[in-house]
Image (tube, rainbow, N blue to C red):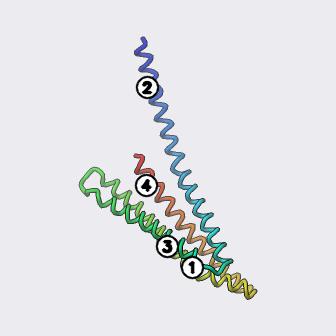
Amino acid sequence: MQENLILFIITYFKTNLNKIIGFFKKVYYPTISFVIYIFLAFGFLILIIKTAFSENFEVLIEIAQMGAIITATLAVLTFTYALTFDNYTLHSHIKKDVINTGKYFYLSCLNFIIGIIFLTVFGKAFAYAIEDNDMLRLVINGFFLIICFSIFLLSSGYFAIGIKNILKHLTN
């Protein structure tokens, strides 16, 4: 009698624990991806605002170096990890997923570098337009800064998707 009760309790908790873990995985991955995306988007917005109103680009260059190195390193590491799988093993589908994750990090790195280039060019032009009180140049350069921010949003999105995919592969 007690053995049946203990067995029933164990199976009950096991089935509910699997449901809880399944719900956690369904909610956790999109949530962490969204949080990373929003965090990076606000960081890029602050970076654009600081760059547009200052003439000191040394901090921007340091941030650009760190960001490019981090995203490029993640891309290289995921591609290297994908190369460790054989084509004829049971893990060939994992290899394809890891290669796709590396592509997301690579696209994030490229968009980040393009965004930094746009930011250095148009941020300096925006600062000069403010000094000269030239409204037309201010509007045009402001438009290009908005385009720069959208490039940074693409970079943030690719980075968040890459992190989400890595978390999925590490927990499965």
Q: Choose the circle earlier in sequence order: 4 or 1.
A: 1
Looking at the picture, which amino acid does disc 3 mark?
A: Gln
Circle 3 residues within 10 Å: few <14, some 14–19, many ≥20: few
Closer to the camera, 116 or 87? 116
Mark 1, residue position: 118
Mark 4, residue position: 166
Tally of numbered tags: 4
Closer to the camera, 162 or 87? 162
In the image: residue 75, left or right of residue 150:
left
Which x, y percent locates residue 43? 60, 65
Mark 2, residue position: 11
Circle 4 residues within 10 Å: few <14, some 14–19, many ≥20: some
Mark 3, residue position: 65
Looking at the picture, which amino acid does disc 4 mark?
A: Ile
- Which quadrant of the structure image shows residue 45? bottom right
Q: How much space separates mark 3 and mark 1, taking CA atoms?
A: 15 Å
Q: How much space separates mark 4 and mark 2, taking CA atoms?
A: 31 Å
Looking at the picture, which amino acid does disc 2 mark?
A: Thr
Circle 2 residues within 10 Å: few <14, some 14–19, many ≥20: few
Q: Is residue 50 above or below residue 82?
A: below
Disc number lying in front (2 or 3): 3
Q: The N terminus lies in which quarter of the figure? A: top left
Q: Which secondary structure, mark 2? A: helix
Check the image and name the residue furthest to the left.
Answer: 88
Q: How much space separates mark 2 and mark 3, taking CA atoms?
A: 53 Å
